[in-house]
Image (cartoon, grey):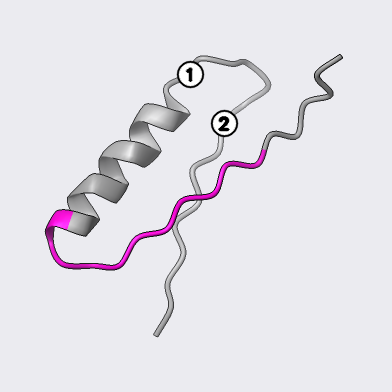
Amino acid sequence: MTKYIFVTGGVLSSLGKGITAASVGTLLKHSGKKVGMLKIDPYINV
């Protein structure tokens, strides 16, 4: 069964979302789980 974990934050950058997601993914991978990461950036970068 596929399970999803979403890491979200407010409108500010650098809240540690990427580090948190990477840490959780690493822990899951070391415990034998198959992990895939996808970053979605909703900001308009102009």
Q: Which residue is mark 1?
A: 15
Q: Is residue 1 above or below residue 17?
A: below
Instruction: Tell me where residue 22 sits by quadrant.
Output: top left
Left or right of 4, for residue 32: left
Task: Name the amino acid, label 2.
Answer: Gly
Give the residue displayed 28% in from the left and 45% down from the top.
24
**Is residue 38 a member of the stretch shown in magenta?**
yes
Residues at marks 1 and 2 touching, judged by CB atoms closer than 8 Å: yes
Quarter of the picture containing the N terminus is: bottom left
- Please state which of residues 8 and 40 is positioned toward the viewer in this rendering: 40
Q: Which residue is mark 2?
A: 9
What segment carries the magenta color? 30-40
**Is residue 20 a member of the stretch shown in magenta?**
no
Whole-percent x, y for residue 4 in the image? 46, 64
- Please state which of residues 4 and 10 is positioned toward the viewer in this rendering: 4
Q: Is residue 11 above or below residue 21?
A: above
